[in-house]
Amino acid sequence: GGAPEGRGGALAAEAPASLEAVAVEISASPLPGSPITPKAGKDSSAALLLPRSALGTSPARSKQTKKAEESGGSVTLGVGGMTCDSCRTGVERCLAAQPGVTSAAVSLMGRRALVSFDPSLVSPAKLAEAVQSLGFDATVIDDGESPLSAGPLSSSALSREALSWRRQFLGSLVFSVPVFVIAMALPVDTFGGGEALPGLPWRTLLLWLLVTPVQFGFGCQFYRRAFRALSHGSSNMDVLVALGSSAAYGYSVVTVAVAVSYGEEGGGQACFETASMLITFILLGKYLEASAKRKTSEALSKLVSLVPPTALLCPPGSLPGAGGDDGDEAARSVPVADLRTGDVVQVPPGAQLPVDGEVVHGSSEVNEHMVTGEPVPVPKAEGAQVIGGTLNCSGALWVRVGAVGNETVLAKIMKVVSDAQMRRPDVQAFADRISSVFVPAVVALALLTWASWAALLSLELLPDLSMHGWHRASSLAFMFGCAVLVIACPCAMGLATPTAVMVGTGVGAERGILFKGGDVLEAASRVTAVVFDKTGTLTSCKLRVVDAAPWLPGLTRAQLLELAGSAESASEHPIGKAIAAHARAQGLRVAAPECYRACAGYGLTCRVGASEVLLGNREWLGRHGVSLSAA
């Protein structure tokens, strides 16, 4: 006649706070009706963090595509081979010059071009051919493809690129390390001070032999890309690398040739190590850059991997109660890409939902924390909306497909992240103006530096340096001029901003924070207040038990936790997992339950040893005759 032992207590749980699953937009003025008031005299802004369901098209993209929507066309191109901002500017100008193109935006780090155009005047294939005519790789990315799964920004493509740069760097390092040791660390007379030829020391000959494979083997790619850029009337970072390394190598060869011809002691003034070390450090920078992009792409690809590649498609009339038996045998596995709006798919317990849609049969609980940030699964029954990529926890669901491809919530999230790289911050506009004349200005400055030092030394205006002879003076003048080329080679001004935007947006997406563009990141430096729309955005999605309170006489706290932990020992529900984990952490015996029966969204009944356990929400307890007072 007494109450079952499983009804004799209550458990409390909490979700630790951490930032999760939000979108970020920056407002330059206080929110209407907001209690937050900027301090007088300060440039204040507020960040409004929205649920992902509220995501829309970015304002910048709307402006870019408005004309294209009126005329009917926009396309995304995958562009490979861009190495600096000068390359990006050249591709952007080339696309903008094509007939029918209303706007073109190119992302250097994203390796994509977003083009708005009139389809009656130009086709996507023609646009790709125009980019290819500049010497770059260009492919049309289909509407149904994600930039992270197709083209030069795909995770596999970036992994291959990073591996290629790594191999080249290590290969160059094999030669450059001995070059550095011989040229910088070992004494000049290490090899006995002898000469292979009059004017050509053994030390210089060995350096020449070691540097040549680096210059024309590992550095050959810089020559090819520099020639390709110059042949199209543009200049980029590859031109600087080719000029800097060639100048050092060529000067050294000329110095050796003159020394050998006259039999003078000039061959030892060669600077072969400059060419080798320059190419090696550039390769190292390329490898680090490719690694950063690969890691960012992998972080974003985790969102894509939430959606399973296949789904169980139910033919018409196979739903339970619709003429079929139970729908299981009739369902067949098909690729998600083959699904169409209106199809019905079956989602078994523990599977991820393949599409966005509406539940037409069944009931279950769906874990949507990867999209909403809420840690507790949401009950789903007929008529409820579900999101692709979320996890079906308990019961089987039959879902009518409502959105596929780019129309799904996850696809829109990916689009926000992808389009973010197209929105350049204000500081990038300044960098673009500098980059357009960067290479010619650097070359001119290098020549001016060399000429100035050569004049000063030849006129003996610097006697402390001029007294060491012509070879020493000319070598110093050349080295100073070459230093200008070497320092400018990485083109940091053009690379720093797009790299920071790409890595920043990628790391944010990995942590559930979606920045809508580089301009938003730039404005974030002025944020003074952050407004959260709900507590779900602050949870880490990991529940934990904080207290257990038995009220049945004779039932201890440990017994309550042992019964509840055993009942939930095989549960997939986050609350059940938290209870079972807490019981194990307390060192209590957690046994497998018997006669287990669960009802999605309500609770469960089972037997643990000799005790009948009833565990669930207030409605579930009420169904079984247990009334909970307000106290």
Image: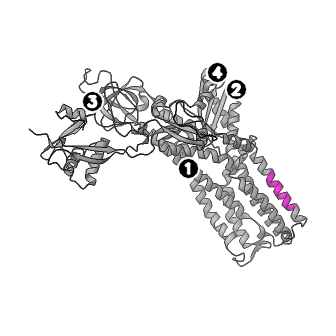
Which residue bears the numbered disc 1? Answer: 292
Q: Are marks 1 and 3 in contact (CB under 8 Å)?
A: no
The quarter of the displayed image where residue 330 is located? top left
Which three-letter amino acid code belongs to the residue tagged 4? Ser
Magenta segment, which residues? 444-454
Distance from disc 2 to disc 1, alpha carbons, whole Å, reads 36 Å
Q: Which mark sits nearer the N-terminus, 4 or 1?
A: 4
Mark 4 burial class by Cα count in 10 Å: few <14, some 14-19, many 20+: few
Q: Quadrant of the C terminus?
A: top left
Q: Nearer the viewer, residue 400 or 421?
A: 421
Which three-letter amino acid code belongs to the residue tagged 2? Pro
Q: Nearer the viewer, residue 266 or 422?
A: 422
User: Of discs 2 and 1, which sits in the foreground?
Assistant: 1
Which three-letter amino acid code belongs to the residue tagged 3? Glu
Distance from disc 4 to disc 3, alpha carbons, whole Å, reads 50 Å
Q: Which mark sits nearer the N-terminus, 3 or 2?
A: 2
Q: Which mark sits nearer the N-terminus, 4 or 3?
A: 4
Mark 3 burial class by Cα count in 10 Å: few <14, some 14-19, many 20+: few
Distance from disc 3 to disc 2, alpha carbons, whole Å, reads 56 Å
Q: Is residue 5 left or right of residue 537?
A: left
Which residue bears the numbered disc 3? Answer: 329
Residue at the extreme front of the image, as rendered? 40
Which residue bears the numbered disc 4? Answer: 120
Q: Which mark sits nearer the N-terminus, 2 or 4?
A: 2
Placement of 272 over or under 558, stated as above or below = below
Q: Secondary structure at mark 4?
A: loop
Q: Which mark identifies residue 527?
A: none
